[in-house]
Amino acid sequence: MESFGTTDVYLSLTKNYDGAELKQHLQEIIASAKVEVTPGSTVLLKPNFVTFANSQMSCTNPFFIKAVCEIFLDLNARVSIGDSPAFGSTKRISGGIGLSDMLKGLPVDIVNFTKGPRIQLSKGGYIQVASEAVEADLMINLPKLKAHSQLGLTASVKNYFGCVVGTKKAVMHAKYGEVENLFESLIFDVMTYFQPSFNLLDGIEIMNVTGPVYGKPAQLNLIAGSWNPVALDSVVYTLADKPSSCYPLALEAKARNLPGHHVDQVFMPMMETKVFDKNIFSTPDTLRDVSFSPAALAKSAIKRLWKKYV
């Protein structure tokens, strides 16, 4: 059985990305969830860096990332930040959202996922995942809560897909996007491979109505943490405008009977969802095809080559 640990989900309410207040809320969640590291251990932060376009809104907030960096540096861990964006590079997006400047003077490496081992998929075949994610002593998953035109909404579970290296993500979109639930199954295979890891959700300013790049901003003021990404996402579904049965990833979690796939299985030790405004989070009424077109695949490949050689 997959190792998801507890189904506890820790919620906190904060109205902005103010450094001191934000860090305090994150520290309370991390301490309550008993996230511990030994001095010198490697901690990889995995934000949501989807693309350089509209990156200030489409990506995990830089103040959120910096606060988590500082917390684990204070614990004497060796911290790095890594992702494999759909378009562009981790370093370019870090620069675009101002994160690189914020981290100047801190011993934090920013890496792009380009190589690593292949893992077997439950429905056949293999996929390559990032060596940095595999080799880290602890991964901290830092998704941004967003409406999503293909999956309805995305939070913790989907963000693990960024551990797939380079253009392989776009290829998997094209290969599995139109075949039953193969794409959702692939996402869960990758997510499961990286358990246990800890999830800290940036739900302060969310992407509303559509996404994952050009949605509308909305203030939900939510921070959530859990060792169990399925349980955390189950809580998120209760804050959106549609039942969980409308979201493909929720259906896949239920089909796999994963711990925390229903909110009734979740315990919230710090705060209940009733403190959050449930009239804010609007998700798409109809979902687009998950598959990427050949043109999108070519565009992704060209952008990666340009950044590599120019």
Image: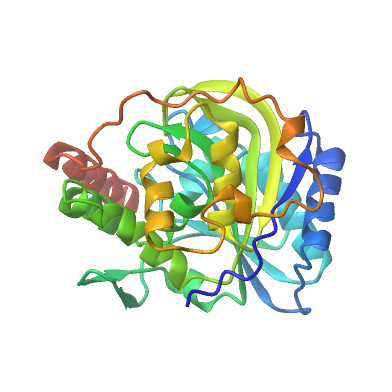
In front here: 252 or 295? 252
- In the picture, measured across the screen, residue 194 lies left or right of residue 176, that is right
Residue 176 position, x and y percent, is: 20, 53
Q: Is residue 286 above or below residue 185?
A: above
The residue at the point 56 percent across, 58 percent down is: 260
The residue at the point 36 percent across, 70 percent down is: 115
Q: Does residue 112 appear anywhere in the picture?
A: yes
Residue 68 position, x and y percent, is: 72, 53
Residue 12 position, x and y percent, is: 78, 42
The residue at the point 50 percent across, 34 percent down is: 146
Q: Is residue 233 above or below residue 276?
A: below
In front here: 174 or 255? 255
Q: Is residue 207 above or below residue 20?
A: above
- In the picture, measured across the screen, residue 205 lies left or right of residue 59, that is right
Q: Does residue 167 appear anywhere in the picture?
A: no
Farthest left residue in view: 294
Q: Is residue 195 above or below residue 47?
A: below
In front here: 124 or 131? 124
The residue at the point 37 percent across, 68 percent down is: 129
Image quadrant where residue 161 sits: bottom left
Farthest front residue in view: 264
Residue 256 position, x and y percent, is: 39, 63
- In the picture, measured across the screen, residue 269 lies left or right of residue 288, that is right
